[in-house]
Image (spheres, helix red, strand yellow):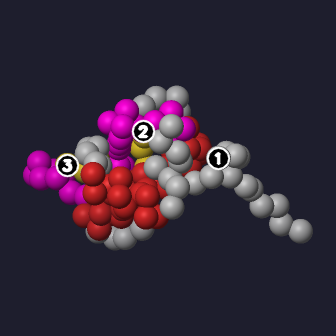
Amino acid sequence: MKQTFRDPFDYPLRTKKEIDEQLKQNPPSYKVFAEISFIPDLKGDNLHKNSEIAVFVNISEMNFTPKQRERFIYLIGPRYKGKDEIRIKVNTFNNPQQNIEKGKEMIYELFLEAIRAPCE
């Protein structure tokens, strides 16, 4: 038998309609930074080390309520190290630019899921 984990929060989550209304009135304004690893060659030009990138976002810029912040930290799991800056590594595609877009998409999906928590 497989063990399933449940959401530990006992409050009801907000609906998609409520989230859409909030996003119309107050769109997200957080900044996402990406880091690409390069190694120089003998001529001094930069070469891609690999296609893996790291995407960084600051939780405090997301303007979460305490419950939403707690839910976001729960959703990112072991990536939360006690600091406001979160790092997510992405190596899905062979192209770093596609990995950056995937990382931004992942952060936005986490943001959407976190704001389902009550605004109280």
- Observer-nearest residue: 37 or 40? 37
Q: Is residue 117 left or right of residue 11?
A: left
Q: Is residue 48 visible?
A: yes
* Residue type of the residue flagged with mark 1: Tyr
Question: Residue visible at 12% across and 53% down?
Answer: 45
Q: Upstream in the sequence, badge 1 or badge 2? A: 1
Q: Amino acid at mark 3?
A: Pro
In front: mark 2 or mark 3? 2
User: How far apart are the two marked residues, 3 and 1, measured between alpha carbons?
Assistant: 52 Å
Whether residue 120 is situated above or below residue 55 in the rendered picture: above
Picture coordinates of residue 5 (x, y %)? 74, 56
**Residue 66 is inside the magenta segment:** yes
x and y, in percent, of residue 88 in the image: 43, 49
Residue that mark 2 sits on: 64
Residue 93 tag number: none
Towards the viewer: 62 or 37: 62
Which residue type does callout 2 highlight?
A: Phe
The residue under the point 28% across, 57% down is 24
Looking at the rendering, the stretch of residues picked out in magenta corresponds to: 41-69
Residue 109 x %, y %: 43, 59
**Residue sitting farthest toward the top:** 82
How many residues crowd around disc 2 within 10 Å: few (fewer than 14), some, or many (20 or more)?
some
The residue that disc 3 covers is 40
Query: Which residue is identified by label 1?
Result: 11
Real-space Cα distance between discs 1 and 2? 16 Å
Q: Secondary structure at mark 3?
A: strand
The secondary element bearing badge 1 is classed as loop
